[in-house]
Image: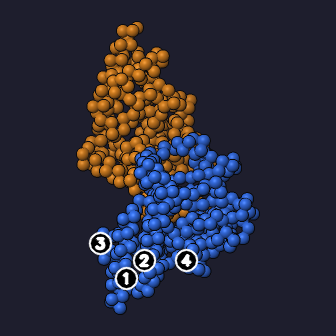
Chain colours: A blue, B orange
Amino acid sequence: VLSGYWSHKSITYARHEGPVRIAWDGRDGNYRCAPRAADLPAARSAAYLHWVSNETVEGVAVSELLGEGGTTRVVDMSSDLLSRPMSIAPFDLVYAHAQKNLGPAGVTVVIIHRRHLDEPHDELPPILRYRTHVEHRSNYNTPPVFAIYVTMLVLRWLRETVGGLHAMGEINRRKAARIYRVLDENADVYDAHADPAARSLMNVTFRLRSSAGTAPLIARAEQAGLVGIAGHRSLGGLRVSLYNAVTEESAEALAAFLEAEAHAARRRG
Amino acid sequence: VLSGYWSHKSITYARHEGPVRIAWDGRDGNYRCAPRAADLPAARSAAYLHWVSNETVEGVAVSELLGEGGTTRVVDMSSDLLSRPMSIAPFDLVYAHAQKNLGPAGVTVVIIHRRHLDEPHDELPPILRYRTHVEHRSNYNTPPVFAIYVTMLVLRWLRETVGGLHAMGEINRRKAARIYRVLDENADVYDAHADPAARSLMNVTFRLRSSAGTAPLIARAEQAGLVGIAGHRSLGGLRVSLYNAVTEESAEALAAFLEAEAHAARRRG
């Protein structure tokens, strides 16, 4: 499934290993939309169906479960795993780097259904086989102990301080809703990138309709203590990331800033 | 070069990729010795000559530069890089994980001669090509920032507090000499594993001649605050690791403990 920057990278890598069929192509829609299950052709004949559950660059999320029964589902959840309750049962393999919602860069979480552990992969060196890591309980090589330790602390915070995934999901939903509301209510100034049905809760992407105002707005935001809102270099514009560590207070501060900016833009005419 | 536990692992992995010729085999000598340059057959016809500069399990170090002129030299310096001054010039590729002398687990240092960067490796995905990482200045993927940051702090400590690699090498030489002296002066009690010409400065391996005393000695050492001296599970016996972070005071405390243990063993008869 080609839904944005990261799935494009995945496809490039997959092509290195074998032929790739693009089951859904978001390029025509300028990566504003996400596929619905009904949009996809049958994928059971494929070795697997791969998608990225949240495209951080475009701010597009795949919220439906893709693939009919019998499809092997492999999903990159790097940027939304543990951002809300989610059933892992339908997936064959889920992978996620830690550095969005889980912990520091340097550790990757892989959840694999045990039925895939017995598949032969003699062409791979042992360290590249998931079975090796399962058999050695993730201690086949010396693991990145510090990153794993901090991830444990984050998981405890998520469970004990935040109150679990349901609470986390509600917080994230409110944060994103607050920012999207500003964009929708000030659509004469802001142009939200993602189709409403495909909006990410983690990354809100938008542009100023007067694009010359982007750099000055980013500068004023920094003066107000609001940093990191420039869009990804591949897309430009603006991007607000709302990972678990971002508080509702931070999201509110940014929303208020964007509202004030919209009023000022209108006054400037 | 098969000189111990880690080079055996390297050979197992290399065999996965192609035929391996063992240029020097330390198994016959029970991994007590290290090769000298004159011991090796010509290796210029090989794609590369690989060795492990310090075998942590057996406490055996390869101190000579192996391979005649024109040999492509690839060396695993995981356990002794930055333990003393060393010229990198003769090597084509040096690699070392951080977690002995450099920093926390999770980062690996690779030093590669630029002449190897242009070799085609189309069979590898880009992330497994060194050229990719050079071109992206080690930022192709999100790097393990914390581990790299701590490594920087360790390097500063090495340069500014210790006084550089020459000073570090002298400290390490004294630490190892102190422990080996105890073993040599009490050879009726202790059996040093490595041949004197092959002794590692990083890992001193030895056995009690009365092997039944090993577990009680380890227990008494722990009571005295001296931990981590059990040998690697594959070899048993005792192993004292003297990486950069181990102080001379620590080495002295262990040496004194081992001397007292030797006296006590003699009294017990």
Q: Are marks 1 and 3 on the same chain?
A: yes
- Mark 3 residue type: Ala
Callout 1: chain: A
Q: What is the C-alpha distance between the residues marked 4 and 1?
A: 21 Å
Callout 3: chain: A
Q: Foreground mark, 1 or 3?
A: 1
Q: Are marks 4 and 3 on the same chain?
A: yes
Nearer to us in this view, B268 or B178: B268
Q: Residues within 10 Å of mark 2 (few under 14, many from 20)?
A: some
**Residue at horizontal 58 percent and vertical 68 percent from the top:** A62
- Would residue A182 be found to the left or right of residue A110 on screen? left
Whichever of callouts 4 and 1 sits on the residue coming sooner in the sequence is 4
Whichever of callouts 1 and 3 sits on the residue coming sooner in the sequence is 3
Which residue lies under the disc numbered 2? Answer: A182
- Would residue B195 be found to the left or right of residue B259 on screen? right
Q: Foreground mark, 3 or 2?
A: 2
Count numbered badges in the picture. Answer: 4
Q: Residues within 10 Å of mark 3 (few under 14, many from 20)?
A: few
Q: What is the C-alpha distance between the residues marked 3 and 2?
A: 18 Å
Res B135 seen here: no
Res A26 seen here: yes
